[in-house]
């Protein structure tokens, strides 16, 4: 001890002794560093943190008041080894000495790193970093939102790349501070505001490189939750490729740099136009080919129809010839019959007596009726023969065969008529021509002739 000797009265109260000890300790241990392990941690409603620092042999009570606790980047936990800076004092109501902590750091790891790991673990348990909840980026966004600093290099890089790749894209910038007090809340509010605009299809959030402390705002819980709750996909572009923040885990897409984020968000318009031109050329070629195939099929169909029409016309002409022949034969037969009747009538008239004439006049109507019946029977027989010939002609017509439910099977695309199962194979495409229309069929199975 280096303090001066205080004049002591002969009789001291407990408070006097406690106060003297406090003054001595505070002067002797005004600014010290102590390492130990946290135990008996307790947070009061006032915001103060109370705990015990211990090692293998001893323990020391400690307190971190609300002002210091609010500046902690990480969360105190039971069993955490720390290095604390402060002063020794005495809590007079209980007469216990304690460490009044001004600041503390986790032993062996930085406060930022510990806070990062603690928050990442907690948010991961909530599912905020799950890959299943992440959304794909739109292929051709018309409007892109950007949340970054107004004056940083990041905004210039993003705008330059977007304009170069897709000059027609609309860019809506929400300028925010990207480090310092209150920056996290401003960034979260900007993300929420942009995601609520109906024209925004994707949002880029980020900044240029910097120290870990400078990038810390993108590890804040408010920013992470705003990214997750966004109505549109969010691209995180914080720092350089080696920098990793919690925003990267939460975002739908993580870009190594702001420029890379802009490249990921929009396509190259010139390449799209060129690709569309190539596709248009291919479509036109395909359409021309299909039209040519359809025209060839139509021409073949017209040829088949023309051939069928010629055959029908030939049969009709033959039918006319048969009808004319039948008419001539009937006329000649009737003429002969009439001539015979006249000859018989003359013979009867020339043979004699009146009674024979009278008898002949009685017989003649009968003969005439028989002749008429015979002629009618002959005419009916001829009509039946003509009808039979016409039925035979209709049976020979390909159209009549098709109308009865048959079809003509042809190969595709040659149009060759198939007569045997051996002329096709499973998987071949064939065309079935019906009485009305055609069917394009796929051969699934070949059955032998004996199978019904």
Image (cartoon, rainbow, N blue to C red):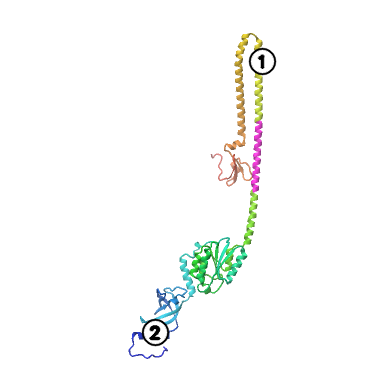
4 left or right, relative to 260: left
Q: Which mark is residue 343?
A: 1
Q: How far across and down, in percent of the image, does residue 345 sit?
A: 65, 14
Q: CA distance from mark 1 to mark 2?
A: 174 Å
Q: Residue at x 61, y 24 (%)?
A: 379
Q: How far across and down, in percent of the image, does residue 126 sit?
A: 46, 65
- Residue at the farthest left position: 11
Q: Is residue 423 magenta?
A: no
**Vertical placement of residue 295 versus 391, above or below:** below
- Reading the image, the residue beneath label 2 is 22
- Residue at the farthest top position: 353
Q: Which mark is residue 351?
A: none
Secondary structure under the numbered disc 1 in the rendered image: helix
User: Dot 2: few (<14), some (14–19), or many (≥20) neighbours within 10 Å?
Assistant: many
Secondary structure under the numbered disc 2 in the rendered image: helix
Q: Please identify the dominant SS of the magenta region.
A: helix
In the rendered structure, which segment of residues is drawn in magenta? Answer: 291-318
Residue 55 visible from this viewpoint: no
Q: How far across and down, in percent of the image, does residue 395 sit?
A: 60, 33
Q: Residue at x 41, y 82 (%)?
A: 88
Front position in the image: 324 or 13: 13
Q: Is residue 295 magenta?
A: yes
């Amino acid at each position: 001890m280096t303090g001066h000797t205080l004049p002591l009265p002969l009789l001291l109260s407990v408070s006097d002794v406690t106060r003297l000890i406090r003054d001595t300790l505070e002067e002797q241990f005004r600014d010290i560093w102590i390492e130990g392990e946290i135990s008996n941690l307790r947070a009061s409603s006032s915001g103060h943190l109370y705990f015990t620092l211990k090692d293998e042999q001893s323990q020391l009570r400690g307190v971190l008041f609300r002002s210091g606790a609010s500046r902690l980047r990480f969360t105190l936990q039971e069993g955490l080894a720390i290095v604390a800076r402060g002063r020794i004092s005495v809590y007079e109501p209980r007469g216990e000495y304690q460490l009044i902590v001004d600041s503390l750091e986790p032993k062996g790891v930085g406060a930022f790193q510990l806070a990062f790991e603690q928050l990442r673990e907690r948010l991961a348990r909530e599912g905020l970093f799950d890959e299943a909840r992440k959304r794909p980026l739109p292929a051709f966004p018309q409007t892109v939102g950007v949340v970054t600093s107004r004056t940083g290099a990041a905004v210039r890089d993003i705008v330059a790349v977007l304009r170069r790749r897709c000059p027609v894209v609309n860019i809506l910038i929400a300028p925010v501070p990207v480090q310092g007090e209150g920056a996290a809340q401003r960034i979260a509010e900007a993300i929420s505001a942009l995601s609520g605009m109906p024209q925004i299809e994707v949002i880029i959030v980020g900044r240029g490189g910097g120290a870990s402390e400078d990038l810390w705002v993108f590890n804040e819980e408010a920013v992470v939750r705003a990214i997750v709750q966004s109505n549109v996909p969010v691209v995180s572009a914080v720092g350089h490729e080696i920098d990793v923040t919690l925003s990267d885990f939460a975002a739908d897409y993580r870009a190594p740099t702001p420029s890379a984020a802009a490249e990921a968000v929009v396509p190259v318009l010139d390449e799209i136009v060129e690709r569309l031109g190539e596709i248009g050329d291919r479509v036109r070629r395909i359409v021309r080919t299909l039209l040519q195939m359809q025209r060839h099929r139509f021409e073949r169909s017209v040829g088949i129809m023309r051939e069928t029409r010629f055959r029908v016309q030939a049969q009709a002409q033959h039918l006319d010839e048969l009808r004319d022949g039948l008419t001539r034969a009937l006329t000649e037969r009737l003429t002969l019959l009439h001539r015979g009747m006249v000859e018989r009538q003359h013979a009867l008239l020339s043979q004699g007596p009146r009674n024979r004439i009278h008898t002949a006049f009685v017989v003649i109507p009968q003969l005439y009726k028989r002749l008429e019946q015979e002629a009618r029977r002959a005419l009916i027989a001829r009509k039946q023969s003509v009808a039979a010939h016409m039925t035979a002609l209709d049976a020979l017509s390909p159209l009549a065969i098709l109308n009865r439910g048959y079809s003509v099977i042809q190969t595709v695309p040659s149009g060759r008529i198939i007569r045997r199962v051996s002329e096709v194979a499973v998987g071949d495409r064939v065309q079935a021509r019906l009485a009305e229309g055609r069917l394009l069929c796929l051969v699934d199975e070949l059955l032998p002739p004996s199978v019904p």
